[in-house]
Image (spheres, grey):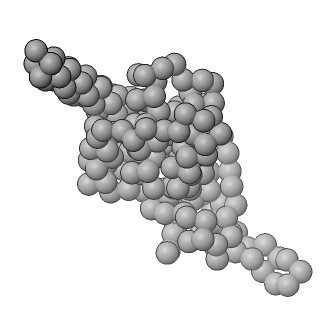
Amino acid sequence: MSFTVGQNIVHPTHGPGTIVEFQEQELVDGYEEYFVIRFDEKRLTVRVPSDRVEELGLRQVMAEAKCREVLRVLRDVPKLLPTNFKERREAVDKLIHSGRPLKIAEAVRELMWRQELKRLNKADTEQFAQARSMLVEEMSIALEQNPQEVRAAIDGALSDAVTARGEHVAEVALAAEAAAA
């Protein structure tokens, strides 16, 4: 995969960033080439060896069509997360750090639904904020919109899902009452 200086990319752990420089560094066994990536939102700069780009999962920013898929995933019925804290943390970390937008959206959706059912603990809240922030940042770049607009679209999709799920639960309860009568 070929990247250029000035290009926006996505790192699976750090989220969206910009390639600001291409460096060569002399090592004992020769030269090593690096992409220098700046993550403005996190005030972080990372050097990634150019020969490990694919292995690390660096990728281009998602396309506009993928943004629509992300919003669809956010509206979908959630999968239940494990109740065991350690298992839940590992499952959500795996989704977030996959670097794949649809998996990150699943993490946001599942944590949002867990929040609807019971209060999130500190670790769950941090994971929710991290995953949501990664989606907002990348979708802002992909759609060329400001982060507030994208955050509103994400929150709207999550709200639609809660409303639809609530209506579904109410319908099931009414049907159960009717069957019992």
Q: In this view, does 44 lie to the left or right of 109?
A: right
Asked if residue 163 is positioned above or below residue 28 in the image, the reply reads above
Q: How many discs appear?
A: 0
Residue 66 point in image, percent of width and height: 31, 54
Q: Which residue lies furthest to the front in this view?
A: 181
Asked if residue 46 is positioned above or below residue 118 in the image, the reply reads below
Q: Which residue lies furthest to the right in this view?
A: 28
- Give the residue displayed 73% in from the left and 73% down from the top: 24
Residue 37 point in image, percent of width and height: 62, 56
Asked if residue 18 is positioned above or below residue 152 in the image, the reply reads below
Q: Is residue 137 left or right of residue 92?
A: left
Asked if residue 25 is positioned above or below residue 78 in the image, the reply reads below
Residue 98 point in image, percent of width and height: 52, 55
Quadrant of the rendering where the C terminus is positioned: top left
Q: In which quarter of the image is residue 149?
A: top left
From this viewpoint, is residue 72 visible? yes
- Give the residue displayed 51% in from the left and 49% down from the top: 95
Q: Which of 30 and 118 is in front in this view?
A: 118
- Give the residue displayed 63% in from the left and 30% down from the top: 123
Residue 55 point in image, percent of width and height: 60, 71
- Give the residue displayed 64% in from the left and 72% down from the top: 52
Q: Is residue 162 left or right of residue 49?
A: left
Q: Residue furthest bottom?
A: 29
From this viewpoint, is residue 127 visible? no
